[in-house]
Amino acid sequence: MKFLFFLLFLYSAFANAQNVYITDQVEIPFRSEPIIKSDNLIKRLESGSVLELVRFKDGWAEVRYQGKTGWIIGRYLSFDPPAKSQLDELKNEITYLQSVISELKYQNPDTSMTKSNEVHLRCSYTDPYGSARSMDIVINKELGTGTNEIGQGELITKANSYEFTVIGGISSVKTTIDRNNLSYSHNFPDLVFGTCKVVEKKVKI
């Protein structure tokens, strides 16, 4: 019976075992001479401290730190920054890049974030002379704009339609799009009617 309890104890211990890791937050003795003694410790240096190498001797490294010269066991030194220093540098770089991206988005509102609110339409109609024509139109709800091949105008959103007027030369072109059946009209040079189809839609029209 005791042996059974012992096995259950071992099973419980292994079942609840967790991995642990050795931290890189270590302090290395900085000594006045290349020997381990209780009275030659100058100070302890944290992981990631930057030292000036003078020379190696018998497994020790003579180094300078903050104006003082001393000795450290050579195996504690590396010509590459420790992982923590590299991670901190990467975090700083990411923070900087995020600030640059935010600034670019502020300076250039026509980004993918803005374009995600666009509806691209291709509207077909017959001109007053009987010729088949088409007009590409972009509706951007976030910016409140309507754009066609003539230019861009302020978008007016109504219950069942979009309207925008583009000033071109000495004339203005008013475009109306029915939101229910995607019928289309504009008033230049004469009032014409047509239909639209969605070429690309990232938001509900």
Image (cartoon, grey):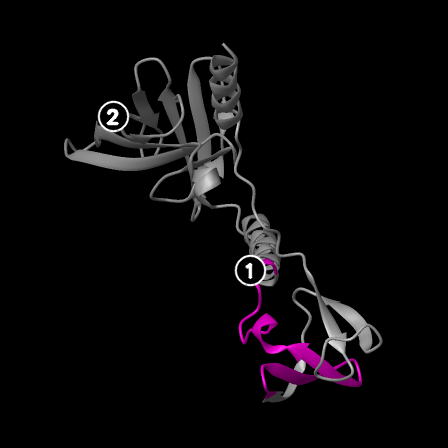
Mark toward the start of the polypeptide (2 vs 1): 1
The residue under the point 31% across, 19% down is 182
Q: Label 2, secondary structure: give it.
A: strand
Range of residues picked out in magenta: 57-84
Dot 2: few (<14), some (14–19), or many (≥20) neighbours within 10 Å?
A: some
Q: Residue furthest top?
A: 1
Q: Where's residue 120, x and y in %? A: 33, 33
Q: Where's residue 83, x and y in %? A: 55, 60
Do callouts 2 and 1 mark residues in contact (Cβ within 8 Å)? no
Dot label at residue 83: 1
User: Horizontal placement of 87 versus 62: left or right?
Assistant: left
Q: Which image quadrant for residue 69?
A: bottom right
Q: Where's residue 143, x and y in %? A: 52, 36
Q: Label 1, secondary structure: give it.
A: helix
Dot label at residue 197: 2
Of the pair 32 and 91, the residue shown nearer to us: 32
Q: Which amino acid does label 1 sit on?
A: Ala
Q: Distance between the residues labelled 2 and 1?
A: 56 Å
